[in-house]
Amino acid sequence: MLVIKDLYAKVAGTNKEIIKGLNLEINENEIHVIMGPNGAGKSTLSNVIFNNPKYEITSGEIIFEGENITDLDTDKIAKKGLFMSFQIPEVIPGITNAEFLKSAKTSITGEKVNLFEFANTLDDNMDKLNIDKKYINREVNVGFSGGEKKKNEILQLLTLNPKLAILDETDSGLDVDAIKTVSKGIKLFKNDKNAVLIITHSTKLIKDLDVNYVHILVDGKIVKTGTKELANEIDEKGFIEYEN
């Protein structure tokens, strides 16, 4: 599904290289986890995949379902079936969650949304995530707590139903109950036709997930790949072994 080949990227307009020869391959029906110390390039990688203009790819390729998307605009990448949750979710005053999701769904599919079916889908997803129905008519993340923002992104994930979900520290700052909700949402989303890439600092979110691969990212490149046991080792010992 996703192939990243020898990727190098820097902060746009500078010589500050952050991604330094990164290779990664994700297939359908897989959950991958990227862990690494602060400043390793984890969040940069997710932004580079989406061609965020704050970063510049200097060499390498990003292939999605056989198509080179390295130079595509961000909105076109999203329309191909990629989704990214933010470490710090955006606040969008003046637009309700319902309006935002309906507009996003229409933009992705290119078809007019059936309002009755769409409302039922939203109701069903909110029930599954135990989200108060009143939230759907509130402005996007306006006045939301950190946990509410992250739950809102999982609601977006289930409703937009992408092919590949990239979750950038979705568990950051969450209490135990919120982490359980996010984990449940990932399990509800996951099927044999899609895939998930989780960027995280700890094992709390992935504890109950069927993770296929864990990658350790240090200084802009993946230095080790293993099973879920590798994440448990990191949880106990940290990244010191890999930083030297």
Image (cartoon, rainbow, N blue to C red):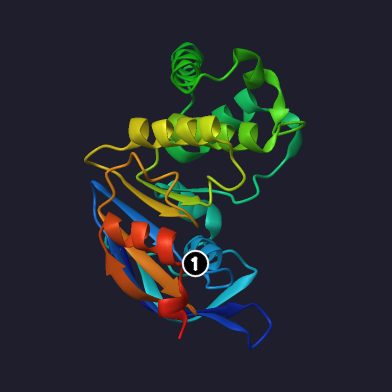
Direction from residue 27 to residue 54 in the image, left or right: right
Looking at the image, is 73 positioned above or below residue 150? below
User: With respect to residue 207, does 122 lie above or below?
Assistant: above
Circle 1 sits in a helix, a strand or a loop, which is it? helix
Q: In the figure, residue 194 lies in which quadrant?
A: top left
**The N terminus appears in which quarter of the rendering?**
bottom left
Rendered location of residue 62, percent (x, y): 38, 69
Foreground of the two, 244 or 164: 244
Who's the residue at 35% across and 45% down the image? Answer: 163
Position above or below: 29 against 190: below
In this rendered view, identify the residue nearer to me: 16 or 180: 180
**To which residue does mark 1 refer?**
45
Crowding near the residue tagged with mark 1, few <14, some 14–19, many ≥20 C-alpha atoms within 10 Å: many
Q: Is residue 189 above or below residue 119?
A: below
Residue 51 shown left or right of residue 26 in the figure: right
Q: How many marks?
A: 1
Where is residue 43? Give x, y as percent: 55, 62
Quarter assignment of residue 224: bottom left
Q: Amino acid at mark 1?
A: Leu
Q: Is residue 138 visible?
A: yes
Task: Answer whether residue 156 is visible to the viewer in this image.
Answer: no
User: Is 105 or 45 nearer to us in this picture?
Assistant: 45
> How far across and down, in percent of the image, does residue 125 sit?
45, 21
Q: Residue at x 35, y 30 (%)?
A: 188
Location of the C terminus (image quadrant): bottom left
Which residue of the protein is positioned furthest toward the front in this rendering? Answer: 236
Instruction: Pick whichever, 186 or 111, lies toward us.
Output: 186
Report x, y in % for residue 130: 51, 19
Q: Residue at x 65, y 69 (%)?
A: 54
